Amino acid sequence: MWLTFDFIYDFTRLNKFSFSLFSWNFDLNILIILSILLVVYVVLYLITPYIYWYFLVKNDENRTLRNKDKIKELILMKEIQQEFENEMEQAFLNAGLKKEA
């Protein structure tokens, strides 16, 4: 008796893991992608309020800095106006003294 070994090629992928859930066949790669997407969604859902808070704080800080700059400019303008008024007053006094003399 002669022994023969027949090779039968099977077309199924060896690295494919599938199971039936509600009569659907899921590949392992699809499950990994879905689980990663779920984790990303949950992380974004939990982190979104903190991101929103960060932008609110930065906006408030920028508004505070802009207001401080405006106040500094207004103080400077008031000082310049006071100096101008003092110079005008001195000029009127000098003109008045010159007319009297």
Image (spheres, helix red, strand yellow):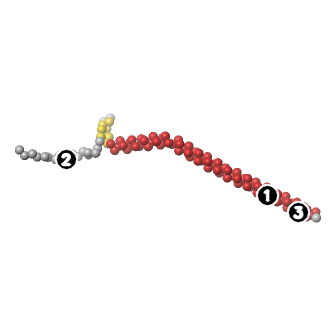
The x and y percentages for residue 10 are: 21, 45
Q: Secondary structure at mark 1?
A: helix
Nearer-N-terminus badge (2/1): 2
**Residue at horizontal 70%, vertical 53%?**
72
Mark 2 and mark 1: Cα distance apart in space? 100 Å
Q: Secondary structure at mark 3?
A: helix
Of the residues shown, which amino acid type is indicated by label 1? Glu
The x and y percentages for residue 16 are: 28, 44
Label annotation for residue 83 = 1
Q: Dot 2: few (<14), some (14–19), or many (≥20) neighbours within 10 Å?
A: few
The x and y percentages for residue 39 are: 42, 41
Q: Is residue 69 above or below residue 36?
A: below
Nearer-N-terminus badge (2/3): 2
**Residue at horizontal 67%, vertical 52%?**
69
Of the residues shown, which amino acid type is indicated by label 2? Tyr
Q: Dot 1: few (<14), some (14–19), or many (≥20) neighbours within 10 Å?
A: few
Q: In this rendered view, identify the residue nearer to me: 98 or 5.
A: 5
Nearer-N-terminus badge (3/1): 1
Q: Quadrant of the C terminus?
A: bottom right
Residue 35 falls in which quadrant of the image?
A: top left
Label annotation for residue 95 = 3
Q: Quadrant of the N terminus?
A: top left
Label annotation for residue 71 = none
**Residue at horizontal 46%, vertical 42%?**
43
The x and y percentages for residue 17 are: 29, 42
**Residue at horizontal 61%, vertical 46%?**
60
Label annotation for residue 9 = 2
